[in-house]
Image (cartoon, grey):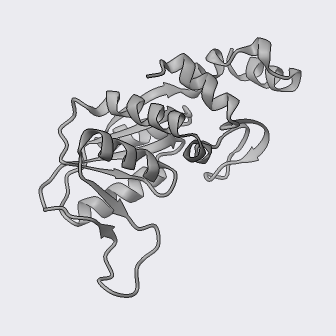
Amino acid sequence: MMNHQQLIQALYRIGAVKFGNFVLKSGKKSKIYIDLRQIISHPNILRAVAEAIWQKISGCKLDLICGVPYTALPIATCISLEHHIPMIMRRKEKKTYGTKQQIEGVFQRGQYCVIIEDLITTGSSILETAVELETVGLHVTDVVSLIDRQEGGKENLANKNYHVHCVFTLHELLQTINIAEIPEQEKNIIMSIAK
């Protein structure tokens, strides 16, 4: 099991933490892009991410888990397999054939479902998922993310009465990356943001 510092260093090593000029899903510009899709090619890191997230929600009331499509799906799958928690899945695209279900898997009205996300920026993806889950009669009280980008998403979710659990913040991530081992340009970005 990796501690948070080891996990952050591992994420940086595999290229999940990128520096440059990026446009986020929210439309905001950023010098840092967190690309957690990289973890699917690194089973030990994927397992460590899943375990770090599990540690945040293991005490929550839950019957099911649901990963926000798409990056959080393998994380949720790992948690489901390791801890024997049933998983359901929200379709990102509306299904126009067969059962036309938006939520896949076995569930019953009134069950508690924890939403799992890779990172929170504005919280919009989590809210979209929560609405779909609540529409089919599930209770969503807790959401968890590996990283909080600290751009208002955690507060947006809290204002909607969701309990938000994050493993670490972007600020903590930047403070933990070993500055001695990174290129000068990336070091300057970290120094300007992590003050």
Name the residue nearer the viewer: 88 or 31.
Answer: 88
**Going by the picture, which residue comes out furthest to the bottom?**
97
Name the residue nearer the viewer: 9 or 145.
Answer: 9
Question: In the drawing, does residue 77 fall left or right of residue 124?
Answer: left
The x, y position of residue 111, in whole percent, is 14, 53
3 relative to 89, above or below: above
Q: Is residue 152 visible?
A: no
**Going by the picture, which residue comes out furthest to the top?**
180
Q: Residue at x 34, y 42 (%)?
A: 79
Question: In the drawing, does residue 58 fall left or right of residue 119?
Answer: left
The x, y position of residue 73, in whole percent, is 44, 53
Q: Residue at x 58, y 24 (%)?
A: 8
Which quarter of the image is occupied by the C terminus?
top right
* Quarter location, residue 165: top left
Question: In the drawing, does residue 13 fall left or right of residue 4?
Answer: right
* Quarter location, residue 103: bottom left
